[in-house]
Each structure stands twice: as structure tokens, then as C-alpha cells.
Image (cartoon, coloured by chain):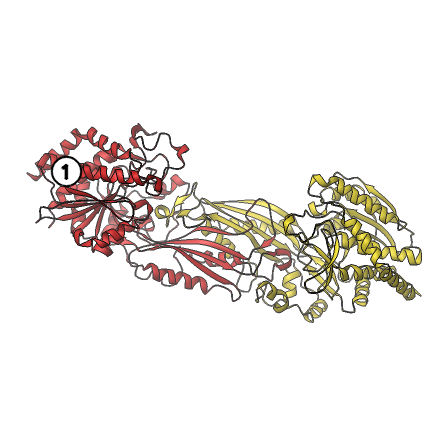
Chain colours: A red, B yellow
Amino acid sequence: MANAQLQSVLDHIDKDFDNSLERLFSLLRIKSISADPAYAGDCKAAAEHLAKDIASLGVATEVRPTAGHPAVVGKVKAGGRPHVIFYGHYDVQPVDPLELWHRPPFEPAVTDHADGRKIIVARGAEDDKGQVMTFVEACRAWKKVTGSLPIDITFLIEGEEEVGSKNFVPFVEANKDEFKADYVLVCDTGMWDPSTPAITTALRGLLYEEVKITAASRDLHSGVFGGTAMNPIRVLTKILGGLFDDDNHITIPGFYDGVKDTPPEILEQWKKLNFTPETFLKPIGLSIPAGEKGRLMVEQASTRPTCDVNGIWGGYIGEGSKTVIPSHASAKVSFRLVQGQDPQKIRKAFRDYVTARIPGDCKVEFGDHSAAPAVALDWNMKPLAAAKRALTEEWGKETVLMGSGASIPIVADFKRALGLDSLLVGFGLDDDNIHSPNEKYDLRSFQKGIRSWARILAALAEVK
Amino acid sequence: MANAQLQSVLDHIDKDFDNSLERLFSLLRIKSISADPAYAGDCKAAAEHLAKDIASLGVATEVRPTAGHPAVVGKVKAGGRPHVIFYGHYDVQPVDPLELWHRPPFEPAVTDHADGRKIIVARGAEDDKGQVMTFVEACRAWKKVTGSLPIDITFLIEGEEEVGSKNFVPFVEANKDEFKADYVLVCDTGMWDPSTPAITTALRGLLYEEVKITAASRDLHSGVFGGTAMNPIRVLTKILGGLFDDDNHITIPGFYDGVKDTPPEILEQWKKLNFTPETFLKPIGLSIPAGEKGRLMVEQASTRPTCDVNGIWGGYIGEGSKTVIPSHASAKVSFRLVQGQDPQKIRKAFRDYVTARIPGDCKVEFGDHSAAPAVALDWNMKPLAAAKRALTEEWGKETVLMGSGASIPIVADFKRALGLDSLLVGFGLDDDNIHSPNEKYDLRSFQKGIRSWARILAALAEVK
């Protein structure tokens, strides 16, 4: 009977898809750019629009003020069944540079991708309005077909994700008593590839440091001082050049402390994936995985910590030549962190490593840009297995449990503030151009995304 | 009798010094900036002014055209005695930034230095008009007192030194038959310190390379690609960071091939010098010599080859943070070369060293900015010993034979084109601000410089 019910819901989704698309379009037309104060009214309008739409599902919904753009909170609770928080965001990135867009960014349309795929083009088409609406439309279909939602849900949609959720996190903390639930569903991640569904089970953290090494008190002439005066670029390159050993391990003492190996059953699954230099590196002109030897490339990309120098500068960098020994040299260095690594400890280890290598008459200064811990799901979490089965059924292909390099800091905030784990399911693709001109969402991502959530809701209802 | 004659010349120099200063001032007032075509007429005027002045010494002098600014050529030849070419240049550096000058750069004046020294302030006060005039005024005194110059002299004063002598060198080559001589006197170098005279016996050469390493075909997001895609900054810092071993030796294979040790007697002399971290490095905020362990600091600064990264850049270098893995990273790397090192061989060794360390899927491109060999005088050259004695007598302090870090490419050109060695004597000081605002020449450098040349001319007349 449950199966017959689900099939009716899925049929309704397909039958009603044009309306789903029009409802998404009406949300996409609202210019809810959170970074620009000029669009504060549009952000409020997007919140009100979404609140009204969610309320139409029989959910008690309010637009709730925060110190910044408002949040949308909607609750439907029958009791005695699983209770989830659904999280997404209605705000979008700025659209600059506008001249690179092929269409006006807030006039959504379905167009043909160069390779024939049908795509929805607009700012927010994927990130995160399209993704949010996959869940809303799935709920709508359940409500329409069965008269109710299959589980208890608290909708929690914010308007400041693209600017760091700085007012949303305090809002959640201040109201944590009303956000009790079993776990959180987040729809802000991607597929493994266009035909393979994925659940993101690990998000790497990010430690981002800046280093400035100063040698002489002024720039020097290399003819006069070359050979006797220490060059800060020499110090900096020596330190940064020593961060990796010949097996591509990071050499900072203690860096890998607490890092756990990927469970063997996950590794077995990953070994079957077609994630190879040919599929992943060739499109960007590379062929040799740069991570730790002895690790699968998929581990290197997701569950192993990394280090990258994101920027380096010092001395004369214009045209031609100048025989200068600069006074100082700088670098921006970041680390993708995994479960078990404490950003503060890694920061200290990095700074100690650098400081120990500074000559006695040079000095080093550090700046910090970010220190967010990694988030990892419990691989044995029951709803994860249920969602995985549901996705596999919808897409006809085994669901991949994958780590993501990028951070979604709110996931760590939910864990910290509410004590809740998150289940990250999404239908974005690598070529969606999020944060860039010509953002798109595959029409197939949207339609099968709705169907996927419909199946997941059914599956989660069975999880005790 | 020779001594009595010399004393009369020296007395005349002191008596006539105010006139010497006025003659220098009239040359300094001419805006002979060679780099700026707007001042071509001033360059010609400076050449004509100088030719007229040298002709007044009884020297057959002409302004000779080149493909660029003209040269001044004057000849006085009695025969049967030593014959030298005197080289200098009348062109000067641009004066930007003008707002940093304390006085108009072409209105020379004698002012008080902060520490009480009397100084001549003007563009070209030292480099090279002041230095050229020390020699001209010494000749004038000899002519005035004795009716003739003590040796045969060919004056060869160019107008394009500050822009690389690119038309002057072909001029010398095209007319090499008229520039036969025993050796060249060059007045474009400095003292050891304000009270210690010096002869520059080695000029380091310069190899200046640019390196660009490319990894991926575009900039990448470090969250997605961190751990699998090679970062070109990692490759670059590893290579540059490995250029020195723990004893500060340069690790490029073959780099030191052909480099000779400084003669023991020179080392003995240098050991007595007060050239210490306290005197040389402390003023620039450093205390630890950065050159090869086991070498005197004066060797590190002058007779040993060096390597400096003069510039490095890659990735995001603005404010804040960006999680980018850049497509490419670059550096400007230069080497000060000493006698025995072939710039072309060192270039090949450097490029081989870098290329061997480029991962299989990255690529490297090189650019070249300069490749000038070092110049070293024969330490046993007879005129050198004579000039050394003369300088020591004038200054009452042992003359230092020193290497200079900076290159004077014309010295190599004279050797190549004319087969002549050069004797480099000059009276510049480290704080003369050549090429910078507020260029100055100590009044003492000018007066005792003239006296020094008067003595050297007498001494060289005795060298068979």
C-alpha cells in the first residue's frame, strides 16, 4: 500500500511538473541578493513568497525577523513519527559581471545546453532556490495525493547563507527550543555525476592562514646585498616547499593526528567508481593525482586533509627585471580539514612549523581568514541508509556516499547548537556555474530531484 | 723632482677647488637624461659642453655621433709612455619621483648632510658627472702646473650608460682601431667607506631569469580539486626552496664549476677589514650573514656567486581570502656571477634543474632578462699596484681591493671589443642615492678624488 501511495505521488509529480517549474520561476524572478543592501526589500519579498507557498502545504509558516534578512520557519507536526528539519536558503549570489550572462539573470527560462540537455537558467536556479523547491514540490505532491506529509517537518529557510549566515546562526541559537528534531535534511549539495545520485557524508573544514615574512628593514639592491642579506622569498619558499614529502604527505608535525581511515566498506564502494585521472583531471589538463600516495583519488579529493598555497607574492612582479631583495614576502595558505582535526590545533601546528624555520634575524606575522571544522556523518546513521535506497531506486544507479571538499558551515552549527546531524542530499552538477554567470540547473535535476525527495520522505517515514 | 712636481699639482688643486666645483656645477645644470627622448637636446648639449672643457686641456676632442646620444672622444698622445683610455658617462638617470627631492635636481648646491658632511646635491652629482670631473680636474691641474699630461690619454665619454650603452658599444666596435691603448681607467665605482679608498677588482655578472609554471588549464576551486590537482605554487616553492642547502650553498649541479678561491693575500687583507654584520647588516635590520658558511662576509658580498628570487607571484594576492588553486605561478630569479662562470652555462644548468623537477603533467616556460659575465682584474696587474699605492698615500689608509656586486657591463665590452683590462677607481659612497631622489656626492669625495687621480696619473707614468 505504501508502494502504491508512493507511485501515485510520483505520477502526480510528473503530471504537475510544468506547474512546479512555474512556481520555481516565480521564486527565481525575485532578486534576493543578500550581499547588497539595495536588495534587502527583494530578500524580504522572497521570504514572504516562500512562506506563503510553504503555508499552502498546510504548514504553519511565518517570516521571522533576524538581525539581518528574515528566515522562513514552517512547522507541521503530527507526533509519533520521525521529525526532521529541512534547511535551505532563499538568498542568492550577486550577478556581476552582468555582461557575461547570456540572458537576464532574473528572467528564468528553460534553454538547451550545448550538449542537448534541457537546463533552467537563472541566478539561483540551482543554488539554492531550485534545490529548495525540489523538496517543497515533493511535499506538495504528498499533500495533494495523500492529504498530509509522511513525516513531521520543520522548514527552516534562511536568507543569509551567501554572506556567512552571521545573523541566522544566532537566530537558531536563540530559538533552539523550538528546533528540536531527529535530524536535519539539507538540500545544497550535488550529484556524483549527471546520472549517479549522491549523499554527501563528509564536508571538509577549512583553515585559511596568511603568512608574512620580513627580513631587512627595507628593499635592498641585490648587487650590493646579494649573498649577505637574507631574502624573505628564500625563507618563504623553503618553508612552503617543505610542506610536502615525496609521497605527498603534509609534513607539519601532528597534522594527521586524529584523522581516521575511511571505512573499508566505503572504500570498496569507491573502488568501483569511475573516478579516475581520465574522468576528473583530464578535463582540467592534468593527469597525475597530487595527493597522498597509497590513497584512492576519491579519498584525496574528499576524506583526506589537504594543503594549498592559494596565493604568494613578494618582490618585483611587473614587466622586465629589477634586482631587488625585498624586505618581505607573503603567502595565503589554506588547509581542507577532515573529521578528527581541530582547526585551532592545526593552526598552532602550522604556525609552530613556520616559526621554527624563521632565521634568527627575520620575523613572521600571521593572519587568519577562516577556521571551520570538518563535518562527518555517522556512516551507520539509519536515515542515511533509507535515503540511499530511495535515491538508488529513483536514479537506477547505486547512490554514492561522497565527501565534499567545500564547506557548508551551517552543518557544523546545527550539530553544535542543536545537537543534530544532517543528511545532505542535492542534485547540483559540477557544471552548474553556481556563484558565476549563467547559473543553471538541469531540468532533469529538478524533476528527478522532486521525485527523489518524494521517495526519501516515504523511506524516512519507515525509519524508527 | 717628480715628487716636487706632484706636490705642486696637489697644491694647485686645493687652491683652485672652488673653480673646479663651479665647472662641475655647470655640467650638472644640463638635464642630460638619456632615457627620455625629450632630453635628447640636453644630452647633446652636455656632450658639447664636456668636449669644449676637455679640449681646453690641450686634448684634440670631438663630439662623435652614434646611433643614439653622441660620445665625446678626446686624444692626447705624445708617444713613448703609457697610454690609457679614460671612460665615464655624461648621461644621468631620470629624476622621478620629483616630489621626493629636497631641491630642484638640476640646480646643484653644496649643502650640509644630516651628520655634518658637506655634500654636493644634484642629479648626476656622483653618477657619473662628479666622478668624471675628478679625472678631468686632475688633468687640468697637471696641465696648468707642468704644461702637459703625464701619460697619453684617450678620453671616451658616453651618453647612454644609464640605458644600457646599446649604441655606444657598436660605436666602440666600429672604431676599435682608434681605441688602442694599454688599459682603461673607469671612474664609476665607490670607496670602501668614507675614509677608505678602494679599487674595484671584480664585478659580478648577472644572469636574470623568469620562470612560469603551469599546472591545470584554468584556476580551480580548492574545495573541489584540493588534494588531487597539482598546485603550481607548490611546484615553484619546492624548486626555489631547494636552491640552497643547509650551509647556504646553491644546489644547482655545476653552479660552482670554474669558480676560483680568492687569493690568500687578498683574504688576509680582507680579514683585517671591519666588514662585519654589525657594520654592514645592522643598518638594514639584519644580523646573520646569509651566504655560504665558511666564507668571509666580504667574499659572500663580492667574490662568491649568489642567487636571489627577486619576485614571486601566483594565485590570489588581494585582501581577504579566496580558495583558489591557480593555473600558474611565476618567479624572477637572478644570479650574481663571478669569474669562471659562463652565464649561458649557468642558464642551462638552472633551466635543467627546474625542468627536472616539473611534474609530468605540468609545464614550465622560461624568459631571460640578462646574461652578463663577471669581470675580474688580474690581481697582479702592474697599474693596479701603482694606483693602489697612490690612493693609499692620498687617503692615509690602506686601499682595499674589493669586488662589487653590481655589474658595469662596459668593462666586459672593453675586454671583448678592445682586448683591454680596466682599472676601476671611484669615490662614491653607499649613501649617495644614485638612481634615487636627492643624489649627492661628498664634497670630500670630489676634492680628494681629484687629488687621488693626480697622484694616480703620476704613479701610472712610472709603470713600464
Using the image as rendered, state which of residue B130 and residue B337 is in the foreground.
B130
**Residue under pointer 1:** A57
Using the image as rendered, state which of residue A191 and residue A315 is in the foreground.
A315
Residue B420 location, x and y as percent? 78, 52
Residue A106 location, x and y as percent? 32, 33
Residue B219, above or below A260: above
Left or right of B443 on screen, residue A270: left
Left or right of A225 on screen, residue B108: right
Picture residue at 33% right of the left edge, 44% below the top: A276
Q: Identify the chain of the residue marked 1, using the numbered disc in the image.
A: A
The amino acid type of the residue labelled 1 equals: Leu
Number of numbered discs visible in the structure rendering = 1
Q: Quadrant of the N terminus of chain A?
A: top left
Using the image as rendered, state which of residue A212 and residue B165 is in the foreground.
A212
* Viewer can see residue A276: yes
Residue sticking out furthest to the bottom: B272
Residue A462 location, x and y as percent? 10, 46
* Viewer can see residue B303: no
Left or right of B397 on screen, residue A389: left
Residue A54 location, x and y as percent? 18, 39
